Image (cartoon, grey):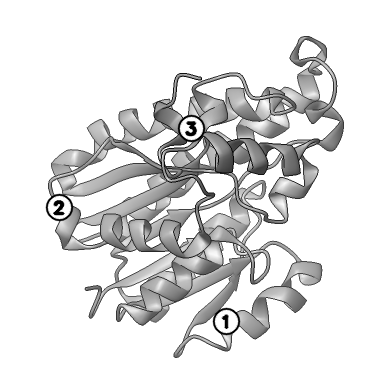
Amino acid sequence: MLQGKKGIVLGVANKRSIAWAIAKKAADAGASVALTYQDERLLEKVKPLADELPAALLLRCDVSQPEQMDQLFRELEQSFGKLDFLVHALAFAKREELEGEYLQTSPEGFEVALRISAYSLTDLARRAAPLMKDGGSIVTLSYLGGERVIPHYNVMGVAKAALESSVRYLASDLGPRNIRVNTISAGPIRTLAAAGISGFSSMLDVVAERSFLKRNVTVEEVGDTAVFLLSDLSRGMTGELLHVDCGYHATGM
């Protein structure tokens, strides 16, 4: 499905990451994949995963550092020559901003969450577009907290709402270049990022009880959806938000 395509997945933290599931599914579908790591601490976790993929590139990139992003795309151009897809699976908020009331969000906490979780997509897309010489696909990850109030999600929900809006504006800007931009809104999954959300286990229980499929979604299912969006099978879709949450988003009570 992705034979001959070359792409990058940002946000792999460990083997339980949604980003890792997407990277592995993309490689299984025939793509050449580059992974990124933020710092030396995460390199220890990401390198063994990269070694599982055929000829995967492993490149450093902290999206809060513009010079690292510039270097990332220089290395991608040198190694790949072009880029067919980019997966943005990056989000961060200070732990203290996910406790208590959203009302108490600090200016610094707001800026960090919005910059890393939302603006980084625009920052990366601007650099990726010139390498998508034959068109391409950009996919990011959101969550229902960008559309509805989810307890303890706070400023991250606001950041996800900004991310989803950014997808639509980027889809408009990049459409004439045949570059598509879409979002997957995945249900709750037990990942490293989820560990910072208070009451997360209860969220899993509620979704399993109330979703149409009466269970929680898996990283493999999200990975399969991502491969569809990265492939030519979705060539008529852009600016879209796809829920992959066993139907939970559509329930009323």
Circle on res. 50? 1
**Horizontal placement of 7 versus 123: left or right?**
left
Q: Is residue 128 above or below residue 21?
A: above
Residue at left 23%, top 80%? 4
Structural distance between the alpha carbons of marks 1 and 3: 27 Å
Q: Which residue is mark 3?
A: 163
Q: Is residue 55 above or below residue 62?
A: below
Q: Are marks 2 and 3 in contact (CB under 8 Å)?
A: no
Q: Amino acid at mark 2?
A: Arg
Q: Nearer the viewer, residue 194 or 7?
A: 194
Task: Name the quadrant containing residue 16.
Answer: bottom right
Circle on res. 235? 2
Q: Is residue 2 above or below residue 228?
A: below
Residue 219 drawn at (x, y percent)? 51, 61
Disc 1 element? helix
| Circle 1 residues within 10 Å: few <14, some 14–19, many ≥20 | many
Q: Amino acid at mark 1?
A: Ala
Nearest to N terminus: mark 1 or mark 2: 1
